[in-house]
């Protein structure tokens, strides 16, 4: 069962420091089922995450922070950030999202 979650993260692009709302689907892993003599069983699957979307919520440049407004430039930043995340998903962001989900689950369990 896929569950969609939101991770607020910071991304640096040149002189821009962006706060990004990254939406991802969390896919829980499945446990292995031992193989029987008849060949039935299942090797299991790892926990994973898939990129859904990204939206820039604020931008800081030269020490000045700007919150998202209706200007068209925000939509352009969303596109650039989404392409960056998609390109670096396997190398950087997938594991970050899995850790975010696990940390969130632990906090929820403590309540």
Image (cartoon, helix red, strand yellow):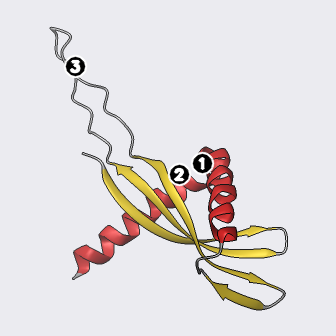
Q: Is residue 102 left or right of residue 58?
A: left
To which residue does mark 2 refer?
A: 94
To which residue does mark 1 refer?
A: 89
- Secondary structure, mark 3, is loop
User: What is the CA distance from the residue labelled 3 to the residue labelled 1?
Assistant: 33 Å
Q: Tags 1 and 2 in contact by the CB under 8 Å rule? A: yes
**Residue 19: x %, y % from top left:** 61, 76
To which residue does mark 3 refer?
A: 35
Residue at 17%, 16% in the rendered image: 36
Q: Quadrant of residue 67?
A: bottom right
**Could you classify mark 2 by the number of other residues whose Cα lies within 10 Å: few (under 14), some (14-19), or many (20 or more)?**
many
Quadrant showing the N terminus: top left
- Which comes before the other along the chain, label 3 or label 1? 3
Label drawn at residue 75: none
Closer to the camera in the image, 85 or 90: 85
Q: Is residue 36 left or right of residue 17?
A: left
């Amino acid at each position: 069962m896929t569950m969609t979650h939101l991770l607020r993260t910071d991304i640096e692009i040149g002189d821009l420091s962006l706060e990004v709302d990254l939406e991802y689907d969390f896919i829980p892993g499945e446990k292995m089922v031992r193989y029987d003599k008849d060949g039935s069983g299942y090797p299991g699957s790892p926990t994973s995450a898939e990129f859904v979307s990204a939206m820039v919520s604020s931008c800081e440049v030269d020490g000045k922070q700007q919150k998202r407004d209706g200007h068209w430039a925000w939509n352009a930043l969303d596109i650039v950030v989404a392409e960056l995340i998609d390109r670096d998903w396997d190398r950087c962001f997938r594991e970050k999202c899995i850790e975010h989900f696990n940390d969130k689950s632990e906090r929820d369990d403590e309540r």
